[in-house]
Amino acid sequence: MTNFLLAGGGTAGHVNPLLALADAIRSDSTSHRIFALGTVEGLEQQLVPQRGYELLTVARLPFPRKLNSYALKFPAAFSKAIAECFKILQDNKIDVVVGFGGYASAPAYLAARKLGIPVVVHEANALPGWANKLGSRFAAATGVAFRGTALKNATFVGMPLRKEIEALSTNSDPAAARRYFGLDPKTITLLVTGGSLGAKKINQTIDESRRVFSAAGIQVLHIVGGKSEFDEVSDGDYKRIKYCDRMDLAIAASNFAVARAGASTVSEFAAVGLPAVYVPYPVGNGEQKFNVADLISAGGGLLVPDKDFTADYVAEKLIPLISNTKALSTMAAAAKANGVSDGAARLLKLVQGVL
């Protein structure tokens, strides 16, 4: 029996790889004990218990980026978080810490180091965050989702995917998936998603283009995100929902997608061979365009800057592409050839190698 602590969380893109590894561990042996470590603000509060795992929490402590009152208080607060993690590791007799980055990971890495507990880091993005940069300096092993990620002694394992997504790489039923969402089982289908939080520009452009899609014979499954100002709509060949807890069916239903270029989204689409137009998040460190760089180079998708994803682009570029069956088939094959469908098993093997 091995006691695992899986640290990470925040958005669905961080929580889902953690849960995918947890499922792989549980499948390996039901005698293993699995704990998740996150914060009280992240999506892990909802998703981890739903999956049947115990969630432990520490304070959400963003790393200060400028000198202010928060920065002055940060060292003491961070030391307290490390002490809390130290106690969690001791109380639960943790044998290995696997971190996925984010607020909960950094104090867990440092507490594990103090106790001599091996640390394994998994970095989901092409540009690593500060927590994983820290952890990788002394980690027993480091796995990355994208080739070329700049972390010390990194091993390419791909992205740990949920079992239901992994299954789509070998078996899917598009007609049944479309019926699940109330769509026509035989009509070509576009999936639009900005991730769990949504994407304002993508949502606006797709809403403006509804009639154009309909005229072209393309039905749209539009996931606007929980914080979007758009209401849910079910109008014939257009289905708009706030949040989707069956992304496996949304992907299975679709011939093409428009999405942000978050690490999980890129990895899931590539694993199942779903071609897409990627519209990277325009704010921040620009990590999303790096996430999708290899896939774009392989021909499995297209990159469109946020400012250029307009109704004109949809009418002049996107609809002709979706309507071109041969082009879609070529892109789908290129996407799948670039994807990894067994990332959870690969990461578990990496973790087992340090025990």
Image: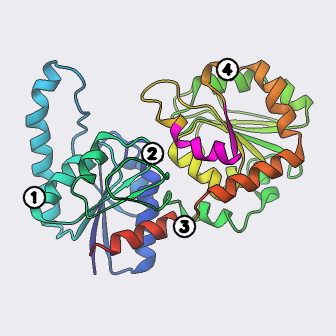
Q: Position of residue 128 (x, y in %)?
A: 37, 43
Q: Position of residue 7 (x, y in %)?
A: 30, 54
Q: Residues within 10 Å of mark 2 (few under 14, many from 20)?
A: many
- Residue that label 1 marks: 114
Sequence order check: which comes first, mark 3 or mark 1? 1
Q: Is residue 89 left or right of residue 105?
A: left
Element class at badge 1: helix
- Residue that label 3 marks: 342
**Relative height, residue 146 to residue 214 (above, below):** below
Quadrant placement of the N terminus: bottom left
In magenta, the rendered stretch is: 290-303
- Residue that label 2 marks: 125
Image quarter for residue 113? bottom left
Who's the residue at 63% across and 47% down the image?
295
**Relative height, residue 322 to residue 334 (above, below):** above
Quadrant placement of the C terminus: bottom left
Sequence order check: which comes first, mark 1 or mark 4? 1
Amino acid beneath label 4 = Asp
Q: CA distance from mark 2 to mark 1?
A: 27 Å
In-front residue for pair 206/284: 284
Q: Is residue 148 left or right of residue 267?
A: left
Q: Residues within 10 Å of mark 3 (few under 14, many from 20)?
A: some
Amino acid beneath label 3 = Asp
Q: Is residue 74 left or right of residue 212?
A: left
Q: CA distance from mark 3 to mark 2?
A: 17 Å
Q: CA distance from mark 4 to mark 2?
A: 24 Å
Sequence order check: which comes first, mark 4 or mark 3? 4
**Relative height, residue 7 to residue 240 (above, below):** below
- Residue that label 4 marks: 308
